[in-house]
Image: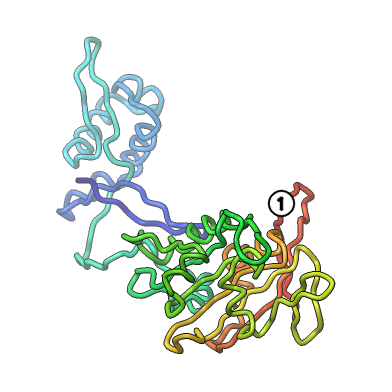
Amino acid sequence: MKNYILKNDGEGYFVNDTKVIENINDVKPIADEKAISIMKKLSKKPYNSAALAKELKFDKKTIAFYIGKLEKAGLISIEPQKNGELIKAVYNSFSYEINDNKIKFDPKMKTKENQYALNFFSKFINNGKFDGYICVGASDPHGEYKAVARDSHYTAYLGMFFGQFIDLPQSMPIILDTDVISKNLFKKNLIVIGGPVTNLVTRDINNFLPIKFIKEEGWGLKDRNGIHIRDYEGTIEKIKNPFDKEKDIILIGGIRNVGTLSAMLAATRFSNITFKGYNGEVPWSLMVRGYDIDGDGQIDSIETVK
């Protein structure tokens, strides 16, 4: 079984295979500049010794010396061929451990940026497991407006986002609004997606929300600054579950599906901006607007409305 070294270049984690050298005395011969130059060549493609000597401008004796040391260390392999031998790299690096510290690595290790989101969604993350349900509107005509949900697929993006924090759930945590009602699942941690027309759970919790959906001449979102009616405006809100104060409800929604998308992107891709000022307060709410800055027809920028 190969060992690997873990690297973080600021954009993510990457691994490279490595040969762990057990004896410190075996390190010096392969840490030589000439040995390293041979390994760099072999890491790109196999060579025979004559071609390798010509490429590096080493004499045959020098090549033979270092090939022997690298093979002994297990970093290369030599395969007999009709016209000589073919030398291949087995590893791309070598390591020597001073102390055999077994520090367990969690591939979901959090960076400073997503700590804000981790803090906001903390009630839904329990020892690497998802605790609660994500509630989406049914795709069949339902409710008093006989509406069909057109924003349920945004949940896939939320699931990808949660993948950095949790393991794959054994049971399906995505549930329809109609199932929450019929199975009386209101006393759970709930992340509710969409507005009150397409998601009946949003309708049922609307009176408890800091920013409420209102219907006058048309649908809008009402906060302390007034009424917001733009399609691309959405809201992210967090309240104590009115049916069980030990649980939380988070709403990610908008008046139209594009508003819900704006709120979803703010809660995921732009979470380091959206939740930076969140300090655990409940209730909590934020209006957001989504913009297509580069003009490709897709929302790529978020603005928070204070």
The vertical placement of 243 against 87, above or below, is: below
Mark 1 element type: loop
Count the numbered circles shown: 1
The vertical placement of 177 against 206, above or below, is: above
Q: Which residue extends farthest front?
A: 144
Residue nearer the viewer, 194 or 49: 194
Which residue is the site of mark 1? 298
Q: Horizontally, is 55 left or right of 272 in the view? A: left
Q: Which of the 4 image quadrants contains residue 65?
A: top left
Q: Which of the 4 image quadrants contains residue 220?
A: bottom right
Q: Which of the 4 image quadrants contains residue 216?
A: bottom right
Residue nearer the viewer, 288 or 59: 288
The vertical placement of 141 against 120, above or below, is: above
Residue nearer the viewer, 146 or 168: 146
Residue nearer the viewer, 182 or 270: 182
Residue occupying the point 40% across, 32% down: 44
In the rendered image, which quarter contains the C terminus? bottom right
Residue occupying the point 76% across, 87% down: 224
Q: Horizontally, is 193 left or right of 304 in the view? A: left
- Residue 228 pos. (x, y %): 79, 74
- Residue 180 pos. (x, y %): 47, 69
- Residue 261 pos. (x, y %): 65, 60
The vertical placement of 112 against 149, above or below, is: below
Residue type at tag 1: Gln
